[in-house]
Image (tube, rainbow, N blue to C red):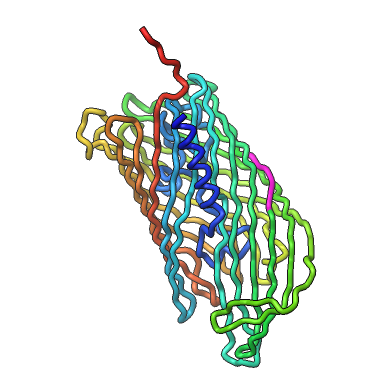
Amino acid sequence: MIKKIIISACLFLSLVSFAQEGTSSPYSFYGIGDVKFNGTLENRSMAGLSIAQDSTHINLQNPAGYANLTWTSFTIGGSSNFTNLKSGDEKGSAKKVTLDYLALGIPLSKKFGGAFGLIPYSSVGYRISNENPISSEVSKRFNGWGGLNRVFLGFGYKVLPNLNVGVNAFYNFGQIQSNSLEYIEDQGIGSRELNVSNLSGMNFNFGMTYKAKFNEKLSVFTSLYYSPGSTLKSENTRNVAIVDYNSQFDLSIIDISEDELSNNELKLPKKLSFGAGIGDSKKWLLGAEVAVQGIGQLNSNYNTIANLSYERGQKYSIGGYYIPNSNPFASYFQRITYRGGLRYEKTGLVINSNSINDAAVTFGMGLPITGSLSNFNLGLEYGKKGTTSDNLVQENYFTVSLSFSLNDKWFVKRKFY
């Protein structure tokens, strides 16, 4: 009963958190917003590396990992992001706190495992102003919020002792709102356009992992997963109004038009990722991963502009972990897992002929909870996204992330003697 209450409460809290703005990036104006890392903190701390295989952690990136579970694992993670923004001579800062994922993995047999949960896929959260110094010209303000979330159900199966396959099914849903105001300085009257897009659709993720003995102490680990391209249905509403505003830009509506309704389809790009590494799974692991992504069609009726295009996305990651001593009777500090990595990503977004790239260094620690197989995880990430060229915005960000991985034997019948 207590377990059911905990899960129900976490699901409720996650739904509330996912409805809030999960980013402060001006680049979230484009497409379906700022696409987030869709994995656990353990993987994120290794720059997104997904090749690690163990029996107590859920691998949300590659569903083949579910077959390795021997303990029921409940995991929840969140992060706090601090960003400094720069464009020309202008500077700004922002902070966001978000819930990143919530999932439950269950071993269903010695060869079969499953998982389900809730993950935010993308977030929209921006406030942009374009104020002209000449009062006779029109100035503009834009702000947006919302994003795309996904619930998933997945299964993994151990085909051979060292070969796993798996599949995730995702249902995507969410709402994106965009509000723009055009006005003439010191006039107090302007026009406001409100766009609302309700998104929905399904997609899948197929994965495979393989582990081979290199010698008595070392093993080779490989990971492959593929997400086919998919379609999102977008139901759009546009509303235009004449508004009165004050110096704090509190708006009151003077005249409002009827809603304009339209529907269109967005295309999520296909994605293929391959990773490989070497190590002793109970001691250390070092690996690399490459992901390539197709060109999506993510323009809606509120963010289609002339200087925007998309290209193929790419991501390169190098990372790993180190455990001084995995023996459960070793001292506490020797049982801490240290993780780290480097990441470089071409996001696929092109503005003013400039590719928007993202590079970061990551570090993390897995802190064991004494007397159990559960652990508390801390992750740090420092990176740079975008550029100041052609009046664009460069983001320097620092992210602090926390997660819990709670592991136990569930669904076991008690025996009394």
Residue drawn at the location 27% of the way across and 33% of the way down = 370
Q: Give the camera-side residue of 79 and 62.
A: 79
Q: Which residues are magenta?
A: 199-204
Residue 410 visible in image:
yes
Against 281, residue 227 (above or below) is below
Residue 147, percent across and down? 59, 56
Q: Position of residue 348 (x, y in %)?
A: 59, 58
Whether 216 is among the magenta residues is no
User: Residue 150 location in percent, x, y?
Assistant: 59, 45
Q: Position of residue 295 (x, y in %)?
A: 65, 54
Q: Main secondary structure of the magenta part?
A: strand
The foreground one among 93 and 268 is: 93
* Front residue (pair 30, 173): 173
The image shows residue 84, relative to residue 216, as above or below, that is below
For the point 31% across and 43% down, which residue is it? 338
Q: Is residue 290 visible?
A: no
The quadrant holding residue 226 is top right
- Above or below residue 219? Residue 173 is below
Residue located 49% across and 32% down the image: 4
**203 in the magenta segment:** yes
Report the number of numbered marks.
0
Q: Residue at x 48, y 69 (%)?
A: 394
Q: Quarter of the image containing the C terminus?
A: top left
Residue 382: name its quadrant: bottom left
Q: Is residue 104 left or right of residue 342?
A: right
> Outermost residue toward the top?
417
Q: Compared with residue 145, is residue 60 higher up or lower down, i.e. above or below? A: above
